[in-house]
Amino acid sequence: MEKNVTRRNFLQATAAASALVALAGCSGEGNASANDTSGVPAADAYPIDAEEWGSGTPKHAEEEMRDGWTRVTNEGGTTLGVASTDKLIQVDGLAFKDLNGNGKLDLWEDWRQGADERAAALAAQLTADEALALMLHGSVFNAGEITDVLAGTGPVEGDNADPTLQEVLDHGIRTMLNFGNANGAPVLARWVNKLQEYVEGQTYGIPVNISNNPKDYGFPSTLGLAASFDPDLVRRVADEYGRAYRAEGVSTLLGVQMDITSEPRWSRIPDTFGEDPALSRDMSNAFASGLQSTYDESGEDQGWGSESVINMLKHFPGDGCGEQGREAHNDYGKFCVYPGNNLAAHLIPFVDGGLHLDSKTGQTAAYMDSYSIAYSDTEEYGELVGSAFSKWKNDLLREKCGYDGLICSDWGVIDDPGAMVSTPWGMEDATKVERCKKIVEAGVDQIGGGFDLVSLRAAYDEMASETSEDEALARVRESARRALRTFYVIGLSDCPYVDSSSADKIVESDELLALAAEAVDKSIVMLKNVGGAISDRGGAKPKVYVPMKFADGAWTLPVTEAVASEVIEIVTDTIGDPTGPAGEDGNLTYAESDVTRATPEQIAECDLVACYINNPTAGVGFDAETETYVPITLQYGEYVADGPNVRETSIAGDVVNGEKENRSYAGKSTTAANASELAFVQEMSEASGNVPLVLCVSADRPMIFSEVEPLADAILIGFNAGGDDYLNLLAGKTEPSALLPLQMPANMDTVEANQEDVPRDLECYVDSEGNEYDFAFGLNWSGVIDDDRVKTYSVEPLTTPEHIEL
């Protein structure tokens, strides 16, 4: 159906519509030192007249690539990529891109100049509308093979019209999160190339900066990486991430999360490096260093280069202390609270880690603000608004730390309540224009989640009328400069194209897969091991009974049988014909009675019983049906919030009709949605007889082990781990080495006593062997691990950052 897309409804809409990297796209020395301007023309020498192409002694060579673009290699300099060779000019025998078509070399086109100089030079030429377009970071969807790559594919979020991707690009918007990559790396690479070809012919030829949320590529979760307590491993993992992202055409990572997870009920814990400020600082430093730097064949850090990815660390100044564990994507979780007066500790990874990297890139190129309101009755943490609107919070970076990098809001902050993603906390009653204005005045450079250029332009007009056109223009050019710098430091403006034929070779390289396997083995913590149930078996395959699990009308084996069979001799259950109700397709589904468990005789012949479970499914802390607050539980059985440490009155709350709301859940009860896991463990404990029972726990947050630990002989815990991740340890092929990156609470009473902003303040569970499941605890085949990692990190948690004073 043909759409009637006006300028207004387009601009207010949200659009809908990732060889080795040196071979996959462009490489060169020109970006290794992003601001080395020695031996280059002075600023007043520009624009420089071009020479006749190929005249004199050319120092460049051209090669046509598979996807139709041309790669131009400069001797000792940056490699360029163009769709049209008409964009090329020659100066001093070297090739450059004439992106504005004036037949001359402008400073911002000269790859010999530093990234800061180029960004400033181009930003100074932009009109208000051109600068404002660079301040939007929306979302698009790469749905599959390219037919009409510029056609819209439906809104990802937002409630207005559906502009095509072409319309988004025609208005100068250049930064976008790609939500889809179901069809593999080559498809994403070709899609990105088509976008770059289209914008190359537009004013200034500013390329498209594709961002992604973290993908795993077979690596453990961020919390799983933290369990290694090995920053060098994390740096190497991030380096592989960088190669893979750039091979796909992705140039910015929206991550990793540096939030200190001092509140054990919070739902985003597995995407963080845990609750300890020092460990999170070192891991965040290592990840950002590995992702942003390009390394040569000998592993030497070259600084910014062709394998570099912009690291947008998040969520400043920390979102891990949501009141009673509630999450800030939602109104019911919009408050972070500080009963321990410990906000400073949450800054440690951001300031001491992200701003002081062990990388030649120096500091993270971008930060994303948190959603939450830092609550205080006295507003000691600034106005009671979300971080995107908070000048107090953003000034911690801008003024206290002197940070001149890019700051982006999280998604949905200008959208009205009721939209698919709407997080305008503290500004719910404001207009979109008022929200945009507040964000810009708070020092934020990009608005995440949409393409509402009309509201942003209206906010600009209000700023200009309140101050002056010159002052308003200078402010938005400042943000444009910061955005453009991220394009220049990684060489995106010089070569935005990638070789799609090489993308798979990088994303599925032997090096990446080997490192992923190493990281997985180092992410699984052994908590219990009675009688050496898990031990070195000298290469022999243990016989292991792995019971099937039932959920949603299906019986499944929690491991991949072919993979498991490489290291264990697997015994499992038998599934009969389905006898359950018919599904949507008309076919019968399975019932719980359709399984025949392994016989006692079969189990008795096994060396181990491996029982796979997930931690208690905790809930979100709010009952939407009754619109009441309820507890988030870390145990399987029913929990009634009637203990001595349950707050009768919440710390935070909106003021409604002059009265502060009480968000307490005192007296309410809840039960884990997967309480059946406890019954499953009890069943397997009885069935195992004298065969050691191993619990393989996949956790997305801490849990209370008192319900299941006494039933087990051994416990392995991974963090959002897959079933196959446990196999090498289970088989005795790899010795466990991981440590707990967070505490496991003894009971819900200590969880209630916990102060949301204070890490490592729980009473920890002590098991039947006398081991305390505290931060940095873990076992190997010999017993409790007590190595340099433990000595380094198992100390009192840091409370203040080294490089900022509040």
Image (cartoon, grey):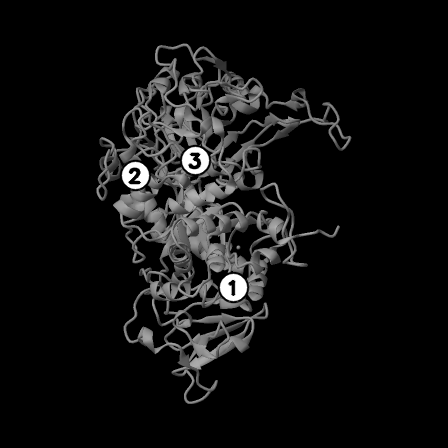
Kindly identify which residue carries mark 3.
270
- How busy is the neighbourhood of tag 2: few (under 14 within 10 Å), some, or many (20 plus)? many
**Mark in front: 2 vs 3:** 2
Tell me which label, 2 or 3, sits earlier in the chain: 3
Kindly identify which residue carries mark 1.
498
Point 37% across, 23% down: residue = 530
Residue at far right of view: 586
**Mark in front: 2 vs 1:** 2
**Alpha-carbon span between mark 1 and mark 3:** 32 Å
* Discs 2, 1 touching: Cβ within 8 Å: no
Q: Quadrant of residue 646?
A: top left
Q: In the rendered structure, which amino acid carries the disc numbered 3? A: Pro
Tell me which label, 1 or 3, sits earlier in the chain: 3
Point 62% across, 49% down: residue = 9
Q: Quadrant of residue 477?
A: bottom left
Badge 1 marks a residue whose secondary structure is loop
Kindly identify which residue carries mark 2.
347
* Discs 1, 3 touching: Cβ within 8 Å: no
Closer to the camera in the image, 108 or 438: 438
In percent of width and height, residue 733 lies at 42, 39
Q: In the rendered structure, which amino acid carries the disc numbered 2? A: Leu
Point 33% across, 31% down: residue = 779
In percent of width and height, residue 452 lies at 54, 48
Can the viewer see residue 785?
A: yes
Residue at far bottom of view: 56
Badge 2 marks a residue whose secondary structure is helix
